[in-house]
Image: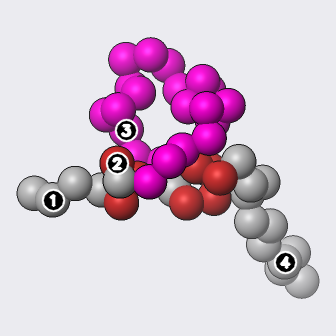
Amino acid sequence: MSECWCFSVPIDDDQLAKLPPEQRNRSCLCPRCAQGLPPETQPAAD
């Protein structure tokens, strides 16, 4: 098993602080979350 991309890039400290301590350096973050970006919004269905 290879390491996730997020183990090889700097992650914003504020975003890491949102993770419970036992998940830090163990759980993967999506690129948007790692950068502190808001979730993507989906267009409303008619």
Distance between the alpha carbons at the discs numbered 1 and 4: 35 Å
| 40 in the magenta segment | no
Left or right, residue 14 beside residue 6: right
Residue 28: assigned label? none
Residue labelled with disc 1: 2
Q: Earlier in the sequence, mark 4 or mark 2?
A: 2
Q: Nearer the viewer, mark 3 or mark 2?
A: 2
In this view, the residue in front, 45 or 35, is 35
**Most distant residue in the left direction:** 1
Q: Earlier in the sequence, mark 3 or mark 4?
A: 3
Amino acid carrying mark 1 in the image: Ser
Residue labelled with disc 3: 27
Contact (CB < 8 A) between labels 4 and 2?
no
Q: Earlier in the sequence, mark 3 or mark 2?
A: 2
Residue labelled with disc 4: 43
**Most distant residue in the bottom direction:** 46
Range drawn in magenta: 9-29
Q: Main secondary structure of the magenta part?
A: loop
Residue labelled with disc 2: 7
Q: Quadrant of residue 43?
A: bottom right
Left or right, residue 25 beside residue 43: left
Check disc 1: other Cα within 10 Å, few if <14, some if 14-19, many if 20+: few
Residue 25 placement (x, y as % from top left) = 35, 32
Amino acid carrying mark 4 in the image: Pro
